[in-house]
Image (cartoon, helix red, strand yellow):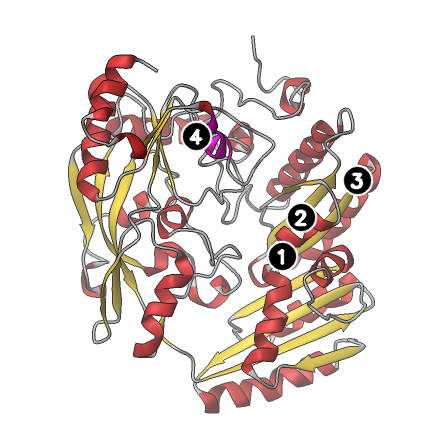
Amino acid sequence: MDRRFLSALGEIYPGNRLLTRDVELLPYESDALTAFQTKPGAVALPDNADEVIATVRLCHERGVPFVARGSGTSLSGGSLPIADGLTIALNRLNRIKHIDPQQRIAIVEPGVVNLHISQAAQPHGLYYAPDPSSQSICTIGGNIAFNSGGAHCLKYGMTSNHVLGMNVVLADGSLTEFGGESLDGCGIGPDLIGLFVGSEGLFGIALELTLRLLPLPELYRTVLAAFDDLGQAGDAVSAVVASGLLPGAIEIMDRLAIRAAETVGANYPDAEALLIVELEGEAQQVEAEFAQLRELIDRSGAFEIRTAQSEDERARIWKGRKSAFSAVGRLYPDYIVQDGVVPRSRLGEALLKIDASKRRYGLEVANVFHAGDGNLHPLILFDGREKGALHKAEALAGEILAMCVELGGSITGEHGVGVEKRDYMPAMFSETELDVMLALRKAIDPREIANRGKMFPGGEAPALTMQGMHPLERQGVISRE
């Protein structure tokens, strides 16, 4: 990194908040997609919004690319550093500035951990609805970048449905505000919040977010059903949806995912598939819906049905599901988490295709998915110490994405494109559509310094942590020459 640029950064940050030594940069070389790594030129640790603004303006002036990073939980390489670029770590901007129980809003900084918002709102009888599995560590800034969802997005929607306003520093250093503190203004003019949320950091950095809070449900009814066959669990989902019920969440785990969850003490039944359905809301309505749900589950062929009788039992059911991703690491040394979407009516077909593909590749796949909206999270397991194992896993992951598009779905539901899926974008979007996206990006960030190399096809392939050829090279999609 240019010494003059580092010197200018030194005027913004004291030495202990500007990291440049290799040992200091090491924790920032990858995010949760650890198959790829890149060493940044430096890492800045701002304490406040003014320092972020000054840093972005300096980057724009000098043409230095930057990546905004929270807790680094991205599963698509979305917060992978740029070689010789600057990583702006936002964890110190972690203040919940204001909670207004009357308007049901929270005003927070981007480094606030998702779960901390609900914890702060709870004394007011409120909570923040989007609940990604990493909610105990992921930050709201990252949730904004990738439009995170979670188990309860079936009923409550994604992050974009809960952002009312934001203060933003765009990639050229200019400041702007989108939205406000009221739902009333959300339908006036173009949806600029919707444009920014899910843009994967390509436009700039959100400095302050105004979030919508919801009343805590009066009652939860959480049902866990165990099946001898994955197809039966899928049929049960279809029956629940066809009945007109709208649960807060409908989740399925297969045998391998169940086995992983058991390593964290989930105490699940020994089954081929588990179905978790949760109803929530006003007590009278939930009890009426629960009677209908229980009748459907009783007829579904489940060999064991459990209903949480306390908040502790409910928490244990969800602990196993939300720990499944990390718990799989206890079964295999390495894994890739995919994030495709298929139409709900074609879930069974998709699972059969995944099963056939994994057998062809000789790999194990643990399936965990948001069954209510068809968002698949197949975890492809492999041992990176074996020659070619990573490439085989990546090839299988690509095949799953292609299958999702063929079935009328998407290459991502909530994890984003990042670097992992950028070369699959042409499978989903036409050349004209991609050109429009890129033109919009360049209109806001003409120097393309904000999170450079993410989302759009082409560009330099990220470094692999394991030696060998990237599977997309073998397919002729990318080249390192």
Choose between 261 and 480: the one closer to the eye.
Answer: 261
Q: Which of disc 2 and disc 3 is earlier in sequence? A: 3
Q: Residue at left 35%, top 63%?
A: 117
Q: Are marks 3 and 4 in contact (CB under 8 Å)?
A: no
* Amino acid at circle 2: Pro
Mark 4 secondary-structure assignment:
helix
According to the picture, the residue beneath numbered tag 2 turns out to be 378
Quadrant in the picture for residue 258: bottom right
Quick one: SS at disc 1? Answer: strand
Q: Are marks 4 and 1 in contact (CB under 8 Å)?
A: no
Residue 196 lies, in percent from the top left, at 31, 43
Disc on the earlier residue, 4 or 1: 4
Q: Earlier in the sequence, mark 2 or mark 4?
A: 4
Residue 29 in the magenta stretch? The answer is yes
Q: What amino acid type should be assigned to the residue bearing mark 1?
A: Phe
Camera-near label (3 vs 4) is 4
Q: Which residue is mark 1?
A: 369
Q: Amino acid under label 4?
A: Glu
Residue depth check, mark 1 versus mark 3: number of the one nearer the observer = 3
Q: Is residue 204 left or right of residue 382?
A: left
Q: Which residue does the numbered mark 4 point to in the structure image?
A: 24
Report the mark closest to the observer, 4 or 1: 4
Q: Secondary structure at mark 2?
A: strand
* Residue at mark 3: 363
Q: Earlier in the sequence, mark 1 or mark 3?
A: 3
Examine the rendered structure and indicate whether residue 222 appears above or below residue 391: below
Q: Residue at x 30, y 64 (%)?
A: 212
Magenta range: 23-30
Please state which amino acid type lies under the numbered disc 3: Leu
Give the vertical position of 284 relative to 105 (above or below): below
